[in-house]
Amino acid sequence: MVSHIVGYPRMGPKRELKFALEAFWDGKSSAEELQKVGDNLKLSTWKQMVDAGIKFIPSNTFSYYDHVLDTTAMLGAIPPRYGWSGGDIGFDVYFSMARGNACIPAMELTKWFDTNYHYIVPELEPNSKFFYASRKAVQEYREAKAHGIDTVPVLLGPVSYLLLSKPVKGVDKSFSLLSLLDKILPVYKEIVDELMAAGVSWIQFDEPTLVMDLDSRQLNAFTHAYTELESSISGLTILLETYFADIPADAYKTITALKGVSAIGFDLVRGSKTLDLIRNGFPPEKYLFAGVVDGRNIWANDLEASLTTLKTLKGMVGEDKLVVSTSCSLLHTAFDLETEIKMNKELKSWLAFAAQKLLEVSSLEKALTNLKNEAFFSANAAAQASRKASSRVTNAAVQEAVSLLRGSDHRRATNVSDRLEAQQRKLKLPILPTTALGSFPQTLGLRKLRREYKINKISEEDYVKAIKEEINQVVKLQEELDLDVLVHGEPERNDMVEYFGEQLSGFAFSENGWIQSYGSRCVKPPIIYGDVSRPKAMTVFWSSLAESMTKRPMKGMLTGPITLLNWSFVRNDQPRFDTCYQIALAIKDEVEDLEKVGINIIQIDEPALREGLPIRKSEQAFYLEWAVHSFRITNCCVQDTTQIHTHMCYSNFNDIIHSIMDMDADVISIENSRSDEKLLSVFHEGVKYSAGIGPGVYDIHSPRIPSVEEIVECIKKMLAVLDCTILWVNPDCGLKTRKYSEVKPALSNMVAAVKIIRKQLIANKSELFSSLWKARTDC
Ligand code: GLN
Ligand code: ZN
């Protein structure tokens, strides 16, 4: 019996990697300095696993940006626009792909399955060439070996790599990404050869796409790939790792039949169907890596329950073939609970971060081999019991309010076209209204201000004065730029989820529970441990203050229930939808309070709608129904003249566009520029959209400043599929990660572009005539 960890967080206990990356990008430190931080983090992680008694320790799970991008580098699949012509792929090329540079935009960033981690999407075409270009996997293996630690190199498997890629723009629709399999397999073989020569005896291939709904052609690709790989390998044990959901029966059948694969890892936390499949038969010659410790959450494992599962598995596959593991990489959980000095003790006893999960894995493994640490197990059982019985968890009034929601639809009384007219009459916006999506740059000064306020270093009075001044500047700037609908810039918010979670009951916060979102960007998800309620108004003070500073409409900014849910660590003791409804009721109160003080436009951000979508199709409709219902609950009771906006970023929305429409927002701003305008294609395909819509006109995730011409072109593309009377113009997302030196020219170009188009529209107005348009030209 042994233990294994699928993968580990990269940022470090105090986000050391984030700070090192940002210093390097800002030209404040050298490549060597960055590398040194990386090397120290890798080594301390490996040592930590050794100390915890883990047998199979992963390597090559560290990354300077993203492991999918690392795989692209490994396979030499660098898009030609980055000008790489062979040789080592240095940080310059690597980070240009990830973040863009002054001349070239970045590659697309998209969500990693249903997590809040984002990967860089490989761009492939029929003529893509592959060759072994980055030796990172073997270097990391050697690095650990030099310290006496034998590791299991982890590679993203060839089939998942291809399935997670996208064809480059303009490639014939008939092109299948899997047709490239025979081109990348020789490179994989070369890598495996080199790893074996370095002394590797186990390799882990991550093939998480196996939990998706794949067709037989896709499943055959796995058979083909692993038969090919095996044919050239002897003396190497291949572990095929799957995670994030139950594995479908046909995929299970395919992989258990693979001769070249000697071990298979399963996520046994996110469903129970895989366990049933294993019960019905698992090949006796293979190792079973049982992922019983949750890599996606921060709750302490119920060790007795896991032990029972493991004992059943042991009975089925035998002691020497069972390996205790995590459900997926620990990348998606926080780093170390020990750094949480201020956390409430009782709550802390209910939790386990990555460092503690290592101990859970190894203690389960020991318990199975009759070396049970009784004290560890009984402390765990006591914590489980205290969580079940705690009065901090249950609020009867909230439970009652949620039970009353059932069976109702919660829709606004008037249809969206009529509402838009009523709103336009009141707001008198010009055609193609311009707006920003919430945050303005979060300067160092602002962060310091909030930090000092939090630790009582500055008084409430001084804090309010400083934030007020900041809002005033942001308002002035937008007026100067001539934006139509203003935002207050969110200077009082550290994070769009944390800000609300801190004011809601049922949420708790860690000090250092950071999770990588993309690149150096980390989020610190709140922990929802109990029933959620809103003790008092959360945003009314700042929003009404901002509103009083300008004659232009000021948007109230809220984070919606689906996002608060999906970007938090959610309780695992009640269904997700119940928690979501509880949050929706709290946000509803806030929306109504904003309306009462005269805020006519309220944006309820829901960037995480798609992220919560279950991986398996059969579960998606149910999720979308309760998620969208929760959104409608928040604003079903506002007046027709109150305009509800929502905002979503980075995703493929096309397949859920009908659910997005069913949210029934008046205006939606949506990510567009970094996904090759895929979003617009849905309207080409005839989806009739009648609410307001603002597909982002430029990518805020890159420091690049878009030109006026470029934005003009972008708006023209939108006008080709969307009526000008419903089109809004805005960036892709909030501006908090940018600098003022980028934001000012970018927004100024955006407004200039709109003015050019407006002139053209007005010249052609007879063609574009409609009642709403008339209302707008009247003003
Ligand atoms: N209103 C938020 C902001 O501008 C939206 C951020 C997001 O969608 N991720 O920062
Ligand atoms: Zn966004």
Image (cartoon, rainbow, N blue to C red):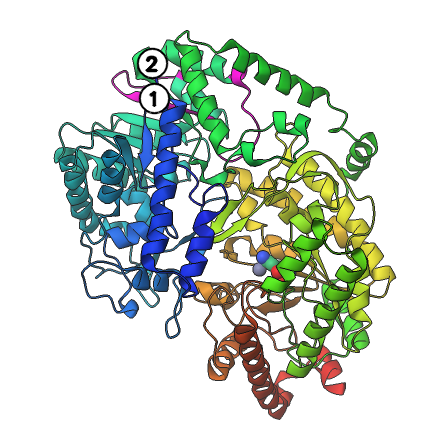
The magenta segment: 279-305
Q: Residue at x 55, y 20 (%)?
A: 302
Label 1 crowding class (10 Å Cα cut-off): few <14, some 14-19, many 20+?
many
Camera-side residue: 53 or 94?
A: 53
Lower sequence index among marks 2 and 1: 1
Q: Amino acid at mark 2?
A: Val
In the rendered view, does 447 fall on the left or right side of 198?
right
What is the x, y in percent for residue 575?
Answer: 64, 32
In the rendered view, does 682 fall on the left or right side of 556?
left
Q: Is ligand 1 within 8 Å of the beta carbon of the residue shown at mark 2?
A: no
Query: Is residue 296 part of the magenta span, yes or no?
Result: yes
Q: Quadrant of residue 696?
A: bottom right
Q: Amino acid at mark 1?
A: Leu
Q: Are marks 2 and 1 in contact (CB under 8 Å)?
A: yes
Residue placed farthest to the bottom in the image? 763
Return the mark for residue 317.
Answer: 2
Determine which residue is flagged by label 1.
288
Residue placed farthest to the front in the image? 457
What is the x, y in percent for residue 42?
Answer: 35, 40
Q: Quadrant of residue 402?
A: top right
